[in-house]
Structure formats: C-alpha cells, structure tokens
C-alpha cells in the first residue's frame, strides 16, 4: 500500500468515527482468549508453557545413563517410544517439525536405540542407518556430539577438539579470553574442559562402525592443519595440536598450570550452581556439569551430584508410554508476555490474577552482580530478570525489557516498590547498549568473530551478538516510558536498525522465526516512539509483510530461513507468526488495511472453542541452524495481543497505554 493510500485510509477511518473493527466474532474471540489464559495461571501467580524440542535431549540422556551405569529400563522404554515416535518416513530425525533429517539428531537417536537393545536389523534401524550414512555419518557430527561419543569409547579423544581448563586463567587483557564467549558457551565449556582433562571413557558394549560411509579416516580431517595455510581457522588447528600435547603432558603431572586451572574450573562450576536451577539452568550445561562432577570423583550420593541429577529430572515430562525433556523452563518470559496480553486486551490492572502475577514477577528480580560485570563493569545498581525460575548469575536484557513492559501496566499492593523496580531495571538495561547501537541478549559487545574459528565453535553459539528484535523491543519500552526520540541512545539504536534492514525491507529475527518476527518488532518499536511511520524504510518493512501474506490471510515461516533466506516468509500459517505480522501492520496506523483485516479474520477463524489456538510449527529459536524451541505459550498469547492491538488501533488508543 502506498503512503497516500495509507493516509486516505486513516482519513476515512477518522471521518467514520467508528471505534470497533466490525469483524464478526471479534469481541468473542478476545473474551475466550482472556478466559483461557486466566485459567492457565499457576497458583503461585506465574504462567508457563512447555518448551518442546527435538529428540536429542532424550537420546543424550539414554547415552548418559549407560555411561553412568544407571539404566532404568522402564524409563528407557519410554525414551525409546518417544524417539521412535519422532522418526521421519525417510528413517532420520529432524531438529524442527517438517524439516529435513539432520545428522546429529539422527545419529544420536540411532545410538540411543542401539544402546537400548533395538536390533540393527529392525527395519526402522536399517532406514535410520541408511539416512545417517547419506548425511555423512559420524564424521559430520559437531564437536559436542562427538565428545559424548568419546565418553563411551565410540570416538577417540584425539578426534575431539581440546578444550583446555586454562581458558579460565587467561586474563581479560588478552584479546581472546573466556569472558569474550557467550554466556551459554561459558556454561557448556567449563564442565567440558574438566571432562576433557579426565577423559572418563566407559565403553558400553556397542559401536557405530556402520556409520562411517568412507571409513574412520574421515575423523582426522576436521582437525588436520594445513601447511602454508595462514587462515585464522588453520592457526587454531595448529594451536589444538599444541593443546593436545599439553594435555598429554598434564596427565603425567608435568603441566605447570593444570592443577590450578582444574581447581578454578571446579570452583567456578560449583559457585554457579548456587541460585540456579542447575548450571546456567539449561540442559546442555546441566548434563555436562553432572558428568564433570562424576569425572572429578564426586560419589553418586554426594549432595552436588544428587542435586545436579534432580535438576535434570525436573525437565522430564512423562506419559504412560513416553518421556520427553525440556531444555529449560520459561516462567518469567511467559508470565511477562501473558500479563501484557491480558492488560492490553482489557483485563483490569487490579484484577487479582494480574496483581498476583506482578507480585510473583517482582520477587524474581535479580539484585546481584552476576557474570555480566565482566563485559559491562559499570557502576549501576544490579537488576534484571532471567528466563527461568532461578539463574541469578545470568539476567538477560530481553527478559528484563519484557518484564518492564508488563510491570508498567499492572497494579500491585505496593506501587512504589513496582515503580522503583522498573526504574532500576531500565537504568541497568540501558548500560548494555553495544558499540554499534544495538542490544544483545546477555552481554555487551560479545562479538569477537575470531572465536568462531576455534575448533570447538561449530555449535553456532560462541558469540552473543546484538540483534534487531531485542533492540526494537527496548525502543518499544522506551517509547511507552516517554523517552525523547532524540535521546542519543535512541538515535544510535535507530541507526543500528536502519543498518540491519534487509534489501527487501525485512529484518532478521535472532530469537524468533524469523524475518516475520524481526520485522514486526522493529515496526512496533518505532511506532511506540511516535516515529513517522511513513518514512520509506518503515513503509518497505510493512510492504514486505504484505508481500509474504498467504492466500488464506495468515503468515508463516519455517526454520529453514536460517539456513537460506530464500525461504523467508514462506511456510504454513501459524497463530504466533500471523499475530506478529498483524501487529507489524497495526504499527503503520491504517486500520482499514485489507491485509491487516484478513490477518485478524484468520486469527478468529482458527481459534479453538476453548479460546486457545493450535500450532505445530516451531516459531522460537535457540541457536540458529542447530537447536530450535517450540514456545508452547506463543500460540495462545501473541494472538490475543494482536487482536487487542487491532482494537486499540480502531479506537485510537496507542498500544502500551497505561490505564
């Protein structure tokens, strides 16, 4: 739609003085959704949806229990049932619904089945074997997957990149040091470094020899340095050779720093158990930490081992015939989003459930100087929130922004405390703006690309780069808070967003799938600043959303857009992505936009009788191209916010208005 037609639409709307969208079933859809979400609140005051992932977590636990020698056959039976239930017709396993078979997921699943005693002649195993070989077999697995194989004797340790404990001893004065890695990589790497030292191999009586299409010699290739190759990658391969020599020396008691490095690594890990639901409160780090404790010689009944295992079992969901595992919990994130949706849709600020949610959320504020001080050593009062129930070392910017958006709209028994909480969190959050004007998730300026060249950096998560979606969400918050758009930090952030825009007008979505997510958030953020939405760069963003709308009125996009942007904006319509697009178009200010109305009609038409929506696709992102999350609360929260935003647009009430 052109700028002139958008202006005409707004004029016609103003002349009609209509304050209701006039879409059949509109009010009923909002009421049903409100009732459903209110009924889903936990007694303590929070909301939480399950995080659904691929089979690799269950497969990893099967292998771990065999390594530990503690196989519960009933648990394993349920695990195997779950793994088989996710097998694709071609024999492989994928990492997102309707995606292709992926090599790590396929081989991990195959190994778990083999460990559980499923015969390799089983037709399902034969198909899995064929697919694993077609994908390149064991040599094509990533570093962390191979490390788990090394634990059970299926890969030699010299085929796994060395992770030296001494990384923790390197001072911040050195260009490449421990604190330049992302928050989640640090939590995975420290226990892995401990494991790498002890190499606690425990053969489990099976092999994967059939999964080497061209022979085991291929395992040597990824870590083989080349002569006369002066690339950074090759430099790190030579350094890995040096590390392996140092490892050989250290196991003979001759390494001068190893004893101190091991001690520091153990202390670092144990310290971060405190105030957290396991190390970093996320599955890979939690499992690695448990293995590291055992490797360090902690007995199975030691309180730290018992606690580490207990935190892992909390992530398990059982049915009569299966078990599935979440990577972590999301109560703070879900509670903030649902609170915003309910308030924007008209639930009173002093509704008892809203008050209870606000009180629960404020109790979760982190008043502790965590690991963020290493990249952001400023004199600011600690604040912030995390994604999970407890993870005090790692509050993050995105959760903090979403919580503040929620708290500014709700009533509490102590308004002064709420306002102090908000103001303190905003001051804390603003210190995390990066050099280029954007904001990242956990750290500030965690962008040294040299770290992506290290041999164990193939999990696509070594860095914590700033991104358009988080930056735009902060601008949305600042707009609602009444910040002057000419404020230097805001102007730098806007410049960053302009620089990040794709040629077709869209924005990449780091934490949601994908370009629909990024584009919606930028448009909504700029609208909150009362920016001129008819500037060409913003109009192009809205035009892209209209361009990728599906014939049925919805929007959809799959995780394959992270592999190749040629797929951007293409996929079956989903409630969450349709809601994002609707809110993006609402930001343009024309309530009579035909594309906008069709999107709203799609949401109403696809709502279930109980007020929920059904969504099978994954619309959340963990690590692009490696690990994806289905945030199950998304399908029910975002559509309500979209309908509420559309109604406010018709009524002339800005989104985010407190009242």
Image: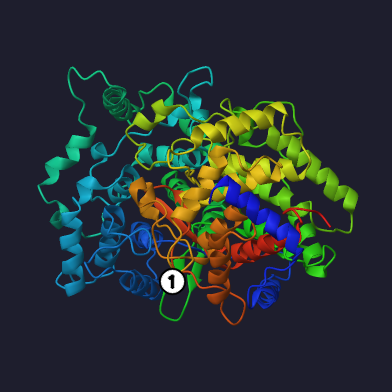
Relative image position of residue 541 (x, y in whole percent): 52, 45
Crowdedness near tag 1: few (<14), some (14–19) or many (≥20) residues, C-alpha within 10 Å:
some
Relative image position of residue 66 (x, y in whole percent): 33, 61
Left or right: residue 268 versus residue 132 is: right
Left or right: residue 328 versus residue 333 is: left
Q: Is residue 628 above or below residue 478?
A: below
- The residue carrying mark 1 is 323
Q: How is the image coloured?
A: rainbow
Q: Residue at x 52, y 62 (%)?
A: 578
Compare residues 3 and 389 and report the one nearer the observer. 3
> In this view, which residue lies farthest toward the left?
214
Is any atom of residue 528 visible in this view? Answer: yes
Compare residues 307 and 602 and report the one nearer the observer. 602
Q: Residue 484 sits in which quadrant?
A: top right
Relative image position of residue 72 (x, y in whole percent): 39, 70
Relative image position of residue 424 (x, y in whole percent): 79, 39
**Which quadrant of the rendered structure holds the C terminus?**
bottom right
Q: Secondary structure at mark 1?
A: strand
Compare residues 594 and 252 and report the one nearer the observer. 594
Compare residues 587 and 462 and report the one nearer the observer. 587
Is any atom of residue 396 visible in this view? Answer: no
Q: Is residue 136 above or below residue 349?
A: above
């Amino acid at each position: 739609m052109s700028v002139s037609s958008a202006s005409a639409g707004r004029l016609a709307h103003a002349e009609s003085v209509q304050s209701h969208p006039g879409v059949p079933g509109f009010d009923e859809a909002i009421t049903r959704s409100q009732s459903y979400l209110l009924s889903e609140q936990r007694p303590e005051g929070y909301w939480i949806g399950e995080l659904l992932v691929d089979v690799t977590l269950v497969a990893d636990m099967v292998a771990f229990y065999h390594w530990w020698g503690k196989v519960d056959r009933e648990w394993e039976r349920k695990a195997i049932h779950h793994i088989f239930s996710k097998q694709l017709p071609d024999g492989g396993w994928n990492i997102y619904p309707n995606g292709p078979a992926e090599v790590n997921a396929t081989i991990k699943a195959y190994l778990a089945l083999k460990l559980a005693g499923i015969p390799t002649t089983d037709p399902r195993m034969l198909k899995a074997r064929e697919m694993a070989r077609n994908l390149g077999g064991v040599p094509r697995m990533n570093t962390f997957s191979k490390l788990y194989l090394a634990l059970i004797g299926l890969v030699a340790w010299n085929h796994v990149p060395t992770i030296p404990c001494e990384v923790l001893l390197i001072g911040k004065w050195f260009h490449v040091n421990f604190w330049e890695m992302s928050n989640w990589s640090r939590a995975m790497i420290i226990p892995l470094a401990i494991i790498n030292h002890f190499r606690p191999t425990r053969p489990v009586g099976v092999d994967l020899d059939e999964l080497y299409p061209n022979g085991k010699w291929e395992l040597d290739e990824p870590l083989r340095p080349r002569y006369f190759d002066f690339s950074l990658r090759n430099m790190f391969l030579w350094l890995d050779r040096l590390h392996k020599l140092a490892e050989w020396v250290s196991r003979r008691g001759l390494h001068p720093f190893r004893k101190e490095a091991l001690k520091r690594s153990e202390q670092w890990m144990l310290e971060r158990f405190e105030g957290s639901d396991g190390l970093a409160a996320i599955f890979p780090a939690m499992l690695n930490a448990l293995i590291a404790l055992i490797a360090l010689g902690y007995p199975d009944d030691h309180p730290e081992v018992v606690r580490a295992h207990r935190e892992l079992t909390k992530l398990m969901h059982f049915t009569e015939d299966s078990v599935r595992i979440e990577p972590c919990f999301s109560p703070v994130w879900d509670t903030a989003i649902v609170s915003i949706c309910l308030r924007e849709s008209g639930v009173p600020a002093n509704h008892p459930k809203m008050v209870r949610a606000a009180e629960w959320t404020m109790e979760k504020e982190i008043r502790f100087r965590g690991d963020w001080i290493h990249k952001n050593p400023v004199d600011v009062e600690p604040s912030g929130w995390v994604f999970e129930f407890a993870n005090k070392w790692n509050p993050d910017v995105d959760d903090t922004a979403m919580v503040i958006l929620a708290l500014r709209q709700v009533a509490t028994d102590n308004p002064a405390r709420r306002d102090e909480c908000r103001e303190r969190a905003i001051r804390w959050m603003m210190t995390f703006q990066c050099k280029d004007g954007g904001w990242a998730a956990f750290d500030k300026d965690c962008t040294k690309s040299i770290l992506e060249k290290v041999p164990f950096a193939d999990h696509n998560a070594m860095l914590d780069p700033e991104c358009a979606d988080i930056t735009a969400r902060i601008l949305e918050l600042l707009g609602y808070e009444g910040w002057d758009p000419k404020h230097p930090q805001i102007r730098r952030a806007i410049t960053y967003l302009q620089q990040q825009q794709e040629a077709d007008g869209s924005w990449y979505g780091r934490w949601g799938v994908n370009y629909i997510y990024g584009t919606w958030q930028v448009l909504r953020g700029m609208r909150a600043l009362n920016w001129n939405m008819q500037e060409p760069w913003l109009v192009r963003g809205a035009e892209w959303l209209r361009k990728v709308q599906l014939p049925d009125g919805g929007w959809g996009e799959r995780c394959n857009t992270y592999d190749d942007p040629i797929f951007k904006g293409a996929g079956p319509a989903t409630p969450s992505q349709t809601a994002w697009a609707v809110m993006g178009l609402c930001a343009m200010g024309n309530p009579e936009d035909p594309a906008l109305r069709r999107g709203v009609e799609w949401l109403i038409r696809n709502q279930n009788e109980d007020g929920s929506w059904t969504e099978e696709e994954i619309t959340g992102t963990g690590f692009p191209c490696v690990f994806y999350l289905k945030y199950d609360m998304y399908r029910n929260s975002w559509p309500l916010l979209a309908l509420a935003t559309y109604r406010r647009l018709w009524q002339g009430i800005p989104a985010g208005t407190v009242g």
